[in-house]
Image (spheres, grey):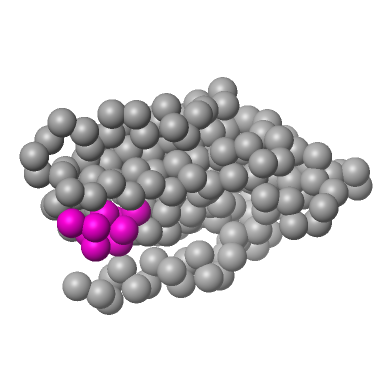
Amino acid sequence: MRVTVQSAPFDPAAFLAGFGAGRADVGAVVSFTGLVRDDSGQMQALEIEHYPGMTESAISAIISQAMARWALADARVIHRFGRLAVGEPIMAVATAARHRAAAFAAAEFLMDYLKSRAPFWKKEIGPAGAAWVVAKEGDEAALGRWRSEP
Amino acid sequence: MTVLYFAWVRERTGVATEQVDTAAPTVAALVDELIAREPRYAAAFADLSAVRVAVDQVLADFDAPLAGVREVAFFPPMTGG
C-alpha cells in the first residue's frame, strides 16, 4: 500500500511504474486518473485544500478496507492539493489483484470513498471570483451500494 | 484542545486553527459554546446539516464525546477525487 499526498504535479505513468510487477499472484492491474475538468469554460484554476495528518490516515483506512474486501495484492493512491491548472492530473488510484473483477471493483470503491470520505475541498477560481465546489448528493449515494452489495 | 476549520467554515470563522479552553462534554456542546462567543461562529455553524466534524482526525457525529480529545475539526462535506 502506498499513499502520496503532494502539491507537486505527478506523472501518471511514473505513478504506475513497477506497480503489481514481479509477483505471481497478480493477474490484473486497474488504474484511474482524475484530471481537472472545466465545465464552465472559464475556470482559471482549481484550488484544493486538505487536512494534513487526517488526509493520509483517512486514505490509508479506505485502502485497508478495499484490500480486505477484495483480497487485493496491492493498492496505491496519489492525491494533489494546492493550485492546479485545467487538464492537470488531480489524483490517481491503482489496484492489483488476482483477477480483473476485483481490481475494477476495488478501484471504483476507492474512488467513491475518496470523493466523500477523504478530507479534501475543491475551490474553482474563475474571472468572477472563487467558489467552493459543493458535494453532490450522488457522491454520498454512491457509497450506499458498497454497503448493500456483498 | 485544538480546533481546526477548513474550506468555507474556515473562511467564516476567520481562523484555520485555534486553542479552545472548554469543558464541553460533546461536539454539539462545543459548537453551542462557540456560537455564543462571537457572530462569526454563528455564521459558520448556521446550518449544521452542511458541516461535518472529525474528532482526533476521525470522522464523528455531533454527539461524539470530547473527554480526552486533543483535536476537533469542522468542515463542509468533502470533495475529493
Nearer to the camera, B8 or A97: A97
State the residue at coordinates (44%, 32%): A13
> Residue A101 lies in magenta, yes or no?
yes
Nearer to the camera, A14 or A107: A14
Residue A89 appears in the rendering: yes
Nearer to the camera, A75 or A5: A75
Q: Position of residue A129 (x, y in %)?
A: 86, 44
Q: Position of residue A3 (x, y in %)?
A: 35, 33
Q: Residue furthest top?
A: A8
Horizontal relation, residue A107 to residue A132: left or right? left
Q: Residue furthest left?
A: A24
Range of the magenta residues?
A: A99-107
Q: Is residue B12 above or below residue B70?
A: below
Residue B54 appears in the rendering: no
Q: Main secondary structure of the magenta part?
A: helix
Q: Quadrant of residue A85?
A: top right
State the residue at coordinates (12%, 35%): A23
